[in-house]
Amino acid sequence: MKLHTFALACALIAPSAWAAEPTAESLVSSRCATCHGAEGHATSPIFPSLAGQNREYLVKQMQDFKSKKRVSETMAPQVADLSDEAIAALADFFAARKARTHRVSDADLVPVGRYIYTKGNSWSGVPACTTCHGENAAGSTNLPRLAGQNSRYLLAQLKDFNQRIRNNDNEAMHLVASRLTELEAKAVADYLSQLP
């Protein structure tokens, strides 16, 4: 009788206590793909593409959304119940995907964007973006890959940095974003979006 009671208790507990950690693929399918695409390529230019993004950067952003250090009504509920292992698995998944490039609407702006990105603007005090994000815009473990990102998303992030809406990352971006003109910001975003 005791064995039967133990088996019954185990059967009742098993679904919640022994549930397997969801795979990255199942999480992408059920939570991420609608906005970020099944392979990390955003379904709309207002969302970031995650394919090829730096793993550690992705982990930090998901943890920041979870702790509400980075504010997003959309992302907070998506990551609220994720374990550290699930966050790491998602970061691995997207980091392993190949980023895409984008066509730009005004090719004449690309050289302006390249100039600002590589040399900055000494007149307005904008430093070269390469200083932090690298010559190929691949970023680093702590800084995002910008190459191949959607131009519209990049512009929105620059605006959020300028208005101090986004403040979970390097404070230097507040200064940089505040010194870029609208034309410079658009040029840099377009330049980055077409980089491989």
Image (cartoon, rainbow, N blue to C red):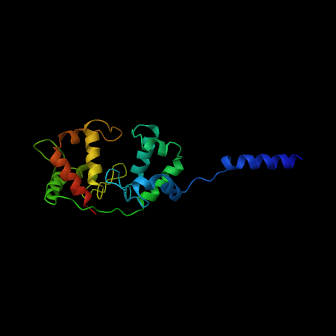
Give left or right: position of 28 versus 135: right
Extreme residue in the left direction: 123
Task: Using the rendered view, name the quadrant where residue 110 is placed.
Answer: bottom left
Identify the residue at horizontal 36%, vertical 48% (top origin): 142
If the image is split into quadrants, where does the C terminus sit?
Answer: bottom left
Numbered circles on residues, count = 0
Question: Depth check: 126 or 99 in front?
Answer: 99
Give left or right: position of 179 versus 36: left
Extreme residue in the top direction: 164
- Location of residue 169 with respect to 192 vertically, above or below: above
Q: Position of residue 140 (x, y in %)?
A: 34, 53
Question: Depth check: 87 or 16 in front?
Answer: 16
Q: Position of residue 91 (x, y in %)?
A: 45, 54
Identify the residue at horizontal 22%, vertical 38% (top origin): 175
Identify the residue at horizontal 53%, vertical 50% (top origin): 85
Give left or right: position of 61 versus 3: left
Q: Position of residue 120 (x, y in %)?
A: 16, 49
Task: Using the rendered view, name the quadrant where residue 76 is placed.
Answer: top left
Question: Depth check: 15 or 143 in front?
Answer: 15
Question: Depth check: 191 or 102 in front?
Answer: 102
Identify the residue at horizontal 21%, vertical 57% (top origin): 191
Q: Position of residue 184 (x, y in %)?
A: 16, 48
